[in-house]
Image (spheres, grey):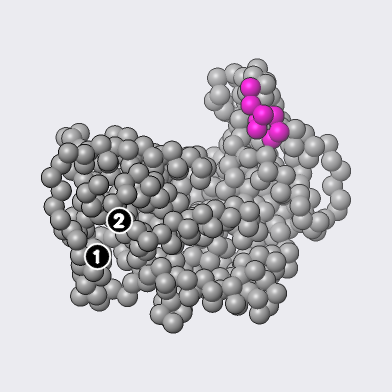
Amino acid sequence: MRPLRVAVIGAGPAGIYAADILTKQHEAAQVDVFDRLPAPYGLVRYGVAPDHPRIKEIIKALRRVLGGDRVRFFGNVEYGVDVSLKELQQHYHAVIFATGAIADRPLDVPGIDLPGSYGAADFVSWYAGHPDVPRDWPMDAESVAVIGAGNVALDVARMLAKPADEQLTTEIADNVYQGLAASNVKDVHVFARRGPAQIKFSPMELRELSHSPSVDVIVHPEGFEIDDAGQEAIAKSKGTRLVVNTLLKYLEAEPTGAPRRIHLHMCQAPVEVLGTDRVEGLRTERTEMRGDGVAHGTGDFTDTEVQAVYRAVGYLSTHVPDVPFDHDAGVITNDAGRVLEVDGTPMPGVYVTGWVKRGPVGLIGHTKSDANETITNLLADLDGLELPSYDDPAAIVEHLTDRGVEFTTGEGWDRLDAHELALGEAVGRERVKVVPREEMLRVSRG
């Protein structure tokens, strides 16, 4: 096979899966994976709660890919600042964007911008030890509202309610532990606009809410409605059936008197965040399911006193320079992974995969099939073309060095990884995550 050099922008699962599939399907392919953060793995490292080590098992597979002899990692390199598409095209036959989705989708209700109202993505980044968010997080609220009906909403609720000392067996960063230890939270209210058969919780995430002896899970009977369409969904889907059964068990269980509580409210749609100078409450409207999958408002409103609101209504990809971007859908404009010009024609040698390709839906496993589609089309497009020769793998290194970019490498990540494991071993934990970017760079240099 002819030598093929490809750049991947984004070192999360989407980008690394693309590198893996490409090097397996093209024996002469060499792939450089770039990320704006000093460490790889994207949302697996910075979007997963520290008490979910089983999900992070995927890092072992991703690490094997980055350790391959035809894949290189360049961290702390920001696309659009340190390197442009035009510059990448001087060194690579193709460029694949896998920048993911890290921003919060907006929620257009009055009062959502009041102090005390937060995006779940920002909170997740904080408790996952992301280097680009503030080290401190306000935890003075006693009663909190979480708006959303997916796993992120459950993660946020669990992290708010679970005592900090129960996190000491995880890789929680020290500043996050200190923040959670100072928390005043007693009640966390999760609001879902639809009924128990329509919410998007996974069964395992839902069951985990009750794993802490310090937390009671309370399902409120108001809104626990299952219409004909819901009954049909339960009959067709094992996952839906497990979710509904778990909710029923919570509904029937007697509270133990635990010091903290997670309240699950169904068929309650947010209509206004209440307050003058800061969040003082959340107004919701009772909804009803009528068999069409839509939550219909009933005009029955309820005010819940809370001092903080977290919106977990979805992630959103942000604009990527030099390529057409659909701001409404939050994706790079594409057809099956081929990036499209404004006129609808494919941009030669430019591709996309992951959430920035299809939107922030699906689990990590869906990313593999997504990457496979993109790589299949990339190889089909390049088949038979006269490819220019990019034989010098040091050229991009020289470019970044000349720019003064303090980039990290796979070897640097190995040093940082070993350092975090050693910090954890010293205090009887699996890992202690290094948070400040400057410290990450210092350790990676050795």
Measured as percent of width and height from the top left, residue 85 is found at: 21, 55
Residue in the image at 36% along x and 59% along y: 71
Give the Cα separation between the discs numbered 1 and 2.
9 Å
Residue identified by numbered label 1: 393
Query: Given contact means CB atoms under 8 Å apart, are the residues at marks 1 and 2 in contact?
Result: yes
Asked if the magenta segment contains residue 260, the reply would be no
Residue in the image at 70% along x and 66% along y: 169
The disc label shown at residue 30, or none: 2
Relative to 273, residue 366 above or below:
above
Can the viewer see residue 250 in this picture?
A: yes
Asked if the magenta segment contains residue 241, the reply would be yes
Provide the secondary structure element on which disc 2 rests. strand
Closer-to-camera residue (243/310): 243
Residue in the image at 21% along x and 41% along y: 382
* Predominant SS along the magenta part: helix
Please identify the quarter of the rendering in which residue 271 is found: top right
**Marker count (numbered):** 2
- The residue range painted magenta reads 236-243
Q: Callout 2: 10 Å neighbours few (<14), some, many (20+)?
A: many
